Amino acid sequence: MRSESQRRNDGLRSGKRLAIDVGSVRIGVAACDPDGILATPVATVRRGSGDLAEIARLGAERDVIEFVVGLPTGLSGRAGQAAVGARAFAAELAAVVAPVEVRLVDERFTTTLAHSALRSAGSDSRQRRSAVDRAAAALLLQSALDSERLTGSPAGELVGARTGDN
């Protein structure tokens, strides 16, 4: 895994990224190409023993420059119990994958949009359950890529070893 990257002319750092949509039962994982053009669903990891190691393995396999973890935030902007869990997961992941950066990025509506897109594509509820987490991760990553391309700064907030306990 790489810890440094170079910024291109369009404001986006070069390098692959892995997005994580943390759920209570499953974790959706998505990745992008080295140019950050397109985020695609990769895997669904079962939550529990070994989940951090599997995500770290997926990142190392792709030589990612960062991990993007979804931060569930309510419409009011308040953080609920799910956000507390996502922050804890991101901190644990950061300890495992250091010095690769881990960022928390607002994931409002990603699961809702993923359900809607899968329903529109004709997936039944059973098929959606197995695909929605990784589709939500892809939406999260695409949003983070688009934000960085627009602003010239990485999306979200940095967590982990480089900044202490965020």
Image (spheres, rainbow, N blue to C red):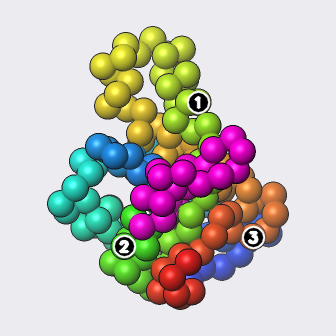
User: What's the mark number on residue 113?
Assistant: 1
- Could you tell which of marks 1 and 3 lies nearer the N-terminus? 1
Query: On the image, numbered disc 2 is attached to which residue?
Result: 92
- Neighbour tally class for label 3: few under 14, some 14-19, many 20 plus, Cα within 10 Å: some
Q: Quadrant of the C terminus?
A: bottom right
Percent x, y of residue 103 = 56, 68
Q: Left or right? Give the position of 81 relative to 13.
A: left
Depth order, front residue of 128/80: 80
Question: CB of mark 2 within 8 Å of CB of mark 3?
Answer: no
Depth order, front residue of 86/105: 86
Query: Which residue occupies 72% across, 62% down?
Result: 148
- Could you tell which of marks 2 and 3 lies nearer the N-terminus? 2
Residue lying furthest left: 49
| 52 over 19 or under it: above or below | below
Q: Is residue 154 visible?
A: yes
Range shown magenta: 63-88
Q: CA distance from mark 2 to mark 3?
A: 24 Å
Q: Nearer the viewer, mark 2 or mark 3?
A: 2
In the image, what residue type sits under mark 2?
Glu
Q: Is residue 2 visible?
A: no
User: What's the mark number on residue 153?
Assistant: 3
